[in-house]
Amino acid sequence: MAQESAYKYVERCKGLNGLDKVILREVRGYSAEVYLDGGQVTSWKNEHGEELLFAGCKVWCHRYEFRLKITLGPAGDLMLTSRIRNTNTDGKPFTFTFSYQTYFAVSDISEVRVEGVETLDYLDNLQNRERFTEQGDAITFESEVDKIYISTPTKIAIMDHEKKRTFVLRKDGLPDAVVWNPWEKKAKAMPDFGDDEYKHMLRVDAACVGTPVTLKPGEEWRGRQELSAVPSSYCSKGRRP
């Protein structure tokens, strides 16, 4: 009871972009603001209303509205549709990049290939984003990969030969694609990644990175990614996804 009486009140309300937050006010005038998404403490003020936490304006000084719609189709397809609107009232545009970070579970990375990005230009994050052109008929994996493919087709196939399964990624409003696997050395150095887990995953993102999006106040951007899993024969018999 003593602890409860120390608070003047606890208020739950909406914060930036409609996110839920809680404001704690102490009887002597101290206050704290906590966003429920991730439990982030974004403000801590003393009895004079002075902010005691630093939050640099350059982190993100723009107002925006973000909406995410997630749909699971009758055939098991997973669709994510994002909308971002510039709601700045100061007339300022803002620029951003976007990526759906999608980690596919695979049987063995050495038995996986990606089709749909061959012969395309890419930025290699392992070589300071130097630009190259992909060679070969399909992408296979023998070492660490961290690439951003530019101006990719709307459909990309991730083929798992051991499981005889193909993931089909369809996208709209997201011209690029990120392909990433940390491989053995980097996986061992990552605290949130098992030493051998790189063998059983592949990240392929629908993205908008090569040319960032700029929105003026009132303008809206929309991006969509649809995922499906089909038997590999769906592709091998000439019926491209």
Image: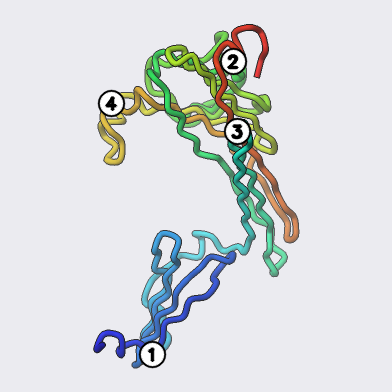
Above-or-below relation of 58 to 71: below
As shown in the figure, which amino acid type bears the numbered disc 1?
Answer: Lys
Residue 127 shows in this picture: no
Q: Position of residue 154 (x, y in %)?
A: 68, 27
Would you identify the image quadrant in which residue 200 lies? top left
Q: CA distance from mark 3 to mark 4?
A: 29 Å
Density class for disc 4 (Cα within 10 Å; few <14, some 14-19, many ≥20) is: few
- Residue hosting label 2: 118
**Residue linked to disc 1:** 8
The residue beneath circle 3 is: 77
- Tag 4 secondary structure: loop
Q: Which residue does the numbered mark 4 point to in the structure image?
A: 196
The earlier-in-sequence mark between 1 and 3 is 1
Q: Earlier in the sequence, mark 4 or mark 1?
A: 1
- Determine which of the numbered discs, if any, sits on residue 185 in the image: none
In this view, 69 is above or below 93: above
**Does label 4 or label 2 sit earlier along the sequence?**
2
Mark 3 neighbour class, 10 Å CA radius: few under 14, some 14 to 19, many 20 or more: some
